[in-house]
Image: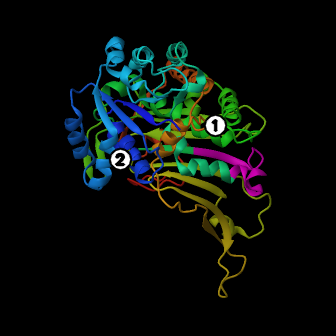
Amino acid sequence: MHNSLLLFGATGDLAQRYLFPSLLHLLRDRLLPEDFRIVAIARSEHDDAAFQAWLRERLGDDYEAAALDELFRRTQYVPADLSDADAMAAALSRFADRPAVSYLSTPPNLFASACRGLEAAGLLAPPSRLVLEKPLGHDLASAQAIDATLKSTLDESQIFRIDHYLGKAPVQNLLALRLGNTLFEAVWERRWIESVDIIVAETAGVDGREGYYADYGALRDMVQNHMLQLLALIAMEPPAAMDTDSIRDEKRKVLRALRPMTPSAAAADSVRGRYRDGVVDGQAVKGFSHRDDVETFVGLRAWIDNWRWAGVPFRLVTGKRMPSRTSEVVVTFKPVTHWLFGPDERKRARANQLRVRLQPEETIELGLMGSLAASEWSANELQPMSLDLAMQPPKRRIAYERLMIDALKGDQTLFVRDDEVEAAWRWIDSVSAAWREAGTPVRDYPAGSWGPLEAQPFLPRTLTTHGGRKP
């Protein structure tokens, strides 16, 4: 395990909310080397004391003073301009005394100059590693340009493209459930599965990120990375082994098998939306008006053209200013071949479903049909029942904790490979091109609703009722 972390973007929102809390937890649990050090890097002209005071204020009262003191004892702050490779090299070359993991929590337009500065400082020589946050490009061409820049100084084995959804415990548990149990392994294909829903809903808007969102929209911001990674894990063939290359090979095959969207299919297989003024959590909020041609909501019906999934719709839905914050995967199985229990029970029948919730809580449920089994009722009177399949972990961890440990150890299994990124962008580009050619409109929806009315066919039934509208 490497014992040196260079954290770029140390004064950014991600660092405050997730990265430094993750480091605090890892230090608390003695999961980092005794001589572990953190070099916090940002443009602000702080010294160590000023940075520590600034970070202590933002972390608030969630951590004991002793834990913060331990973090600060290991942390040194260095002001640096990532757009100036020479200045970076001068400021950071003293930290090349040992192999390091450099974590770029920065906009992608700084990746190239940051790589040049790190190389000049001697911080990219093997076995040093580089961690990159999304977005990795705006389309296939820009993603390939970023990759060419990275490959000019690094080997693929040194590059860790992070997607924090892959660090969530339920996502990893989904693999274990599917591949470690005959019950699911035997039915994980088109003959037994009716549909798959993946939804990532946020109550937050794009406040403070209007410029970024105007360039990306929901399709590029969420679907290209988080949602397609979830789709690939759900749909991939069982790997030959649970090792890094075997798993990523199978994910790439799924992404390459996605049917490109065509202009003729855009109306039936997609919907775009933009939130307007409304009410979320009892608070009035303003609508997104930065650009009228950018979506804050997207619903897609994706098709995987291979033998396992032919004809099975994968519905992908993500949106801002939704009624509740939820991320979940719902696998709906086909109904039983022959119904035996009478018309009344048939009305109450629900399809078997595997429901994996990623947030706000992490749960795994299996929806079945069962009998009330009481003396005053018939034994054949069926009712829906739900089985909780999740084991309570000893500690609920931030997804970034697992990914930081893996990056320090050099385990790339839960990181995204270059060919996965390119395959995802090819499909996303086909959607963008289909929208452009078909003139797919961006439809308004009030903040606090589940998107435009046209989104109803894309929404899973597991969502709660809000505003008089039931998915």
Q: Position of residue 342 (x, y in %)?
A: 73, 70
Q: Position of residue 117 (x, y in %)?
A: 39, 16
Q: Is 74 or 11 nearer to us in this picture? A: 74
Please tell me which of labels 2 and 1 falls first in the chain: 1
> Is 168 left or right of 211, judged from the image as shown?
right
Residue 132 sits inside the magenta stretch: no
Q: Residue at x 52, y 22 (%)?
A: 432
Mark 2 Cα shell of 10 Å, populated few (<14), some (14-19), many (≥20): many
Density class for disc 1 (Cα within 10 Å; few <14, some 14-19, many ≥20) is many
Magenta-span inclusion, residue 180: yes
Query: Quick check: 417 left or right of 47?
Result: right
Going by the numbered disc 1, the residue's amino acid type is Ala
Q: In terms of depth relative to the viewer, which is nearer, 319 or 378?
A: 319
Q: Nearer the viewer, mark 2 or mark 1?
A: 1
Q: Which residues are magenta?
A: 178-197
Helix, strand or loop at label 1? It is: helix
Is 60 above or below relative to 406?
below
Q: Which residue is mark 2?
A: 448
The spot of residue 409 in percent (x, y) is 55, 38
Residue 10 drawn at (x, y percent): 32, 33
Extreme residue in the bottom direction: 375
| Residue contact at pointers 2 and 1, CB within 8 angstroms | no
Q: Say whether residue 132 is visible.
A: no
Residue identified by numbered label 1: 232
